Image (cartoon, rainbow, N blue to C red):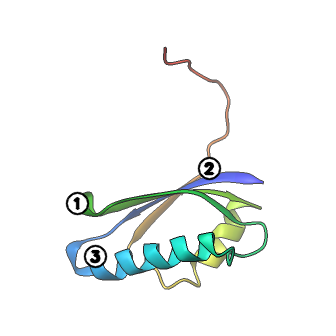
Amino acid sequence: MTKVYVIHEWDESKKDEAVKFFNNLADMAKGKKLPKGFKLEKLNVDEGNKTAICEWDVPSMNDLANVASQMGITWKVKMISPTVKYEHKLI
């Protein structure tokens, strides 16, 4: 499994579409209707800043990208899959 962070950014004209998308995504996750092997760990939506961050546990980043391409997303999306090379303790 691969940890993937997906950062969504939209402009005001896409706000309603984006909010509806994230509500549907949350419903799918709660109802266990995501594709097999996909787990939405966290979904943080900041409507004021027109940004959302999803934390996924998925088979691969490519698998997530393939599924996302079928979801009709029309705003800016960036996927990050961190690999730990070193770790900093922050306190």
| Residue 81 image label | 2
How far apart in space, not on screen, are marks 3 and 2 (Cα)?
26 Å
Number of residues whose C-alpha sits closer than 10 Å to that of mark 3, classed few (under 14), some (14–19) or many (20 or more):
some
Disc 3 + disc 1, Cβ < 8 Å:
no
Disc 3 + disc 2, Cβ < 8 Å:
no
**Mark earlier in primary sequence (3, 2):** 3
Q: Position of residue 62 (x, y in %)?
A: 69, 66
**Mark earlier in primary sequence (3, 1):** 3
Question: Which residue lies under the disc numbered 1?
Answer: 48
**Mark earlier in primary sequence (2, 1):** 1
Q: Position of residue 11 (x, y in %)?
A: 25, 71
Q: How many dots with numbers?
A: 3
Q: Nearer the viewer, mark 3 or mark 2?
A: 3
Q: Position of residue 65 (x, y in %)?
A: 62, 70
Secondary element at tag 2: loop
Secondary element at tag 1: helix
Q: Nearer the viewer, residue 37 or 66?
A: 37
Question: Which residue lies under the disc numbered 3?
Answer: 15
Residue type (three-letter) at the residue carrying disc 2: Ser
Q: Residue furthest top?
A: 91
| Residue 18 image label | none
Number of residues whose C-alpha sits closer than 10 Å to that of mark 1, classed few (under 14), some (14–19) or many (20 or more):
few
Q: Residue at x 45, y 72 (%)?
A: 22
Q: Nearer the viewer, mark 2 or mark 1?
A: 1
Q: Residue at x 31, y 70 (%)?
A: 10
Q: Residue at x 74, y 61 (%)?
A: 60
Classify residue 74 as left or right of residue 11.
Answer: right
Q: Is residue 26 above or below residue 5?
A: below
Secondary element at tag 3: helix
How far apart in space, not on screen, are marks 2 and 1 (Cα)?
26 Å
Residue type (three-letter) at the residue carrying disc 3: Lys
